[in-house]
Image (cartoon, rainbow, N blue to C red):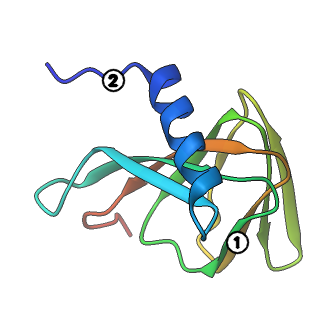
Amino acid sequence: MDVTHLPDLVDELLAAAREAHSGRAAHTLYGNSAHHLRQTVIALAAGHSLSEHNSPGEATLQVLTGRVTLVAGDDRWDGVVGDLAAVPDTRHSLLAQDDSVILLTVITGPQQP
């Protein structure tokens, strides 16, 4: 059984994001090209973002620490620790209001009609 202690990973990734020129760091917990489910922990230093992009499939975002803003067209969602949101199936971006870490869960396999 593969187990990850998320608080330790959160601390590690936040430290890496603060040092990175891009202001971000990530670690895939589960999933690769052989799986339909992928879970990735993403850390963003305050003020940094994931620029507008398409979703690779059905996805949710859970805020593990900090505050983030998810923007999809005219829709905007401000998430805080403990919040979980479905990621829109449209182009979207994510901005870290504070040093933040999210858990992104994505279904990468065939989607149901």
Question: In this rendering, which labeled residue sits more in front, label 1 or label 2?
Answer: 2
Residue 95 appears left or right of 87? right
- What kind of element bears circle 1? strand
| Residue 81 percent across, percent down from the top left | 75, 30
* Residue name at image x 73 percent, y 33 percent: 83
Give the residue type at disc 2: Thr
Residue at the image position 70 percent from the left and 71 percent from the top: 93
Q: Which residue is mark 2?
A: 4
**Where residue 45 sits: x, y (%)?**
71, 53
Which quadrant of the structure image shows residue 47? bottom right
Q: Is residue 108 depicted above or below 99 in this figure?
A: below
- Residue extending farthest front: 19
- Residue 108 placement (x, y as % from top left): 31, 63
Residue visible at 85% across and 52% down in the picture: 97
Quadrant (top left/top right/bottom left/bottom right) for the C terminus: bottom left
Q: Disc 1 marks which residue?
A: 93
User: Residue 87, located in which quarter of the rendered image?
Assistant: bottom right
- Check residue 61 in the rendering and tell me which mark sits there, or answer none: none
Q: How many marks?
A: 2
Residue 87 lies, with reference to residue 52, above or below; the image says above
Q: Position of residue 59 (x, y in %)?
A: 50, 55
Please, what secondary structure does the residue beneath circle 2 have? loop
Q: Determine whether, in the image, residue 20 is placed left or right of residue 76.
A: left
How far apart are the two marked residues, 1 and 2, measured between alpha carbons?
27 Å
Q: Nearer the viewer, residue 4 or 74?
A: 4
* Labels 1 and 2 touching (C-beta < 8 A): no
Q: Nearer the viewer, residue 31 or 97?
A: 97
Quadrant containing the N terminus in the rendered view = top left
What kind of residue is marked 1? Ser
In the displayed structure image, the side of residue 91 where residue 26 appears, left or right? left
How crowded is the residue under tag 2: few (<14 C-alpha within 10 Å), some, or many (20+)?
few
| Vertical placement of residue 87 versus 99, above or below | below
